[in-house]
Image (spheres, grey):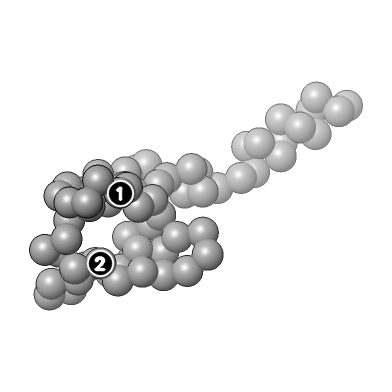
Amino acid sequence: MKKLLCSFMILAVPTWVFAVDSIYLKTGKILKGKITDESGDTITLEGEDAWQEIKRSDINKIKEYFLC
């Protein structure tokens, strides 16, 4: 019964929870989270604790992950 319950809990977790976008900054730092907005010269990233606005001029590359 425990195995069945554990299996159900794993399948019940939405797959978007595992999707993490990565923003590689020119400084070498890597920011991880979900890109929520791309407008003009900034990108908004929702991280674990807060939202961050990052200037495009500070970004080296972006890796976005889609699960659909």
Which residue corresponds to the image point at 45% horizontal and 60% vertical from the top-left? 47
Q: Position of residue 12 (x, y in %)?
A: 64, 43
Which residue corresponds to the image point at 30% horizontal and 71% vertical from the top-left? 53
Residue mark closest to the camera, 1 vs 2? 1
Could you say whether the residue bearing mark 2 is in a helix, strand or loop? strand
Which residue corresponds to the image point at 41% horizontal and 64% vertical from the top-left? 46
Image side of residue 38 versus residue 47, left or right: left
Label 2: how many Cα within 10 Å (few below 14, some 14–19, many 20+): some
Q: Position of residue 24 (x, y in %)?
A: 24, 48
Q: Quadrant of the C terminus?
A: top left
Q: In this orientation, which residue lies closer to the viewer: 31 or 65?
A: 31
Q: Which mark is residue 18?
A: none
Q: Which mark is residue 29?
A: 1
Residue 55, compared with residue 20, is above or below; it is below
Q: Label 2, on which residue?
A: 54
Image side of residue 22 versus residue 7, left or right: left
Which amino acid, by three-letter code, is at mark 2? Ile
Q: Position of residue 37 (x, y in %)?
A: 28, 69
Could you say whether the residue bearing mark 1 is in a helix, strand or loop? loop
Label 1: how many Cα within 10 Å (few below 14, some 14–19, many 20+): few
Give the CA separation, mark 1 to mark 2: 12 Å
Q: Quadrant of the N terminus?
A: top right
Which amino acid, by three-letter code, is at mark 1? Lys
